[in-house]
Image: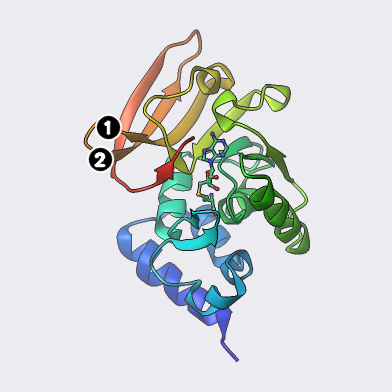
């Protein structure tokens, strides 16, 4: 029997705390979500490896450290409503659901969305709604959002996301540059369309379609 709880505890210390993540709510959330339940059966033993893993349809579940980095940068609170772009396996949505009040997660591939919906329900996350659709349009019917996180890299920040943020809201997303490099960015809204932008470093994500 693999002791997943022990593997998870070690992963948090080695890969998350070890790389400088200090926000208690983020460490606790990653320490609670059973990542082994969000990967294909044959990869359960690799669930706490320090890397993204394939989840089918050419997509990946993000590396745990990257999920932690993005959520820490989003400065989430317990009353926040969060938009998660690119549900994939549902893992990041589950971590968000541990911290925030409500999570809306959008996935363009219906099969992935259906599998994630099932996993999230089985794991007991009742504050997550998975929607099938194009996340670049945001989710106007559930706006405004305190934070928007994207797990796929686009070439620009979709205008709808900025419009669907509360004043003071944050977007954390990877941007792709010509030549193939990607940078993780945090956009903070100051209301009336004004935003500021900070770099969180180089990353590697699947493309936002
Ligand atoms: N957060 C996920 C990571 C999934 S990878 C996890 O924890 O497992 C990124 C996902 O974004 C893929 O599933 C891909 O299908 C999805 N995606 C890409 N472009 C999209 C778009 N425009 N709208 C919604 N989902 C999109």
Q: Looking at the picture, tell me which residue is in the foreground, 125 or 175.
A: 175
Quadrant in the picture for residue 194: top left
Within 10 Å of disc 1 (Cα), the crowding (few <14, some 14-19, many 20+) is few
Q: Looking at the picture, tell me which residue is in the foreground, 122 or 144.
A: 122
Q: Secondary structure at mark 1?
A: loop
Quadrant in the picture for residue 29: bottom right
Within 10 Å of disc 2 (Cα), the crowding (few <14, some 14-19, many 20+) is few
The residue at 52%/81% (across/down) is: 6
Q: Which residue is mark 1?
A: 177
Farthest-out residue, top: 192
Rendered location of residue 25, percent (x, y) = 54, 54
* Residue 146 versus residue 132 in the image, above or below: above
Rendered location of residue 166, percent (x, y) = 58, 21
The quarter in which the N terminus is drawn is bottom right
Rendered location of residue 160, percent (x, y) = 55, 19
Farthest-out residue, bottom: 1
Quadrant in the picture for residue 13: bottom left
Q: Which residue is mark 2?
A: 181
Coloration of the structure image: rainbow
Farthest-out residue, front: 57
């Amino acid at each position: 029997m693999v002791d997943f709880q022990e593997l998870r505890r070690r992963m948090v210390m080695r890969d998350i705390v070890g790389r400088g993540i200090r926000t208690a709510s983020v460490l606790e959330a990653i320490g609670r979500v059973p990542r082994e339940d969000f990967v294909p059966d044959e990869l359960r033993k690799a669930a706490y490896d320090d890397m993204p893993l394939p989840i089918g349809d050419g997509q990946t579940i993000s590396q745990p450290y990257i999920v932690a980095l993005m959520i820490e940068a989003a400065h989430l609170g317990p009353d926040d409503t969060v938009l998660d772009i690119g549900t994939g396996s549902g893992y990041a949505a589950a971590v968000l659901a541990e911290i925030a009040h409500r999570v809306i997660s959008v996935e363009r591939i219906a099969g992935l969305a259906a599998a994630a919906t099932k996993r999230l329900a089985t794991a007991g996350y009742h504050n997550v709604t998975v929607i099938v659709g194009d996340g670049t349009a945001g989710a106007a019917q559930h706006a405004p959002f305190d934070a928007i996180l994207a797990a796929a890299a686009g070439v620009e920040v979709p205008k709808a996301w900025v419009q669907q943020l509360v004043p003071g809201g944050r977007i954390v997303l990877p941007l792709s540059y010509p030549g193939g490099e990607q940078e993780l960015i945090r956009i903070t809204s100051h209301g009336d369309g004004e935003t500021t932008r900070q770099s969180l470093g180089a990353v590697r994500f699947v493309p936002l379609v």
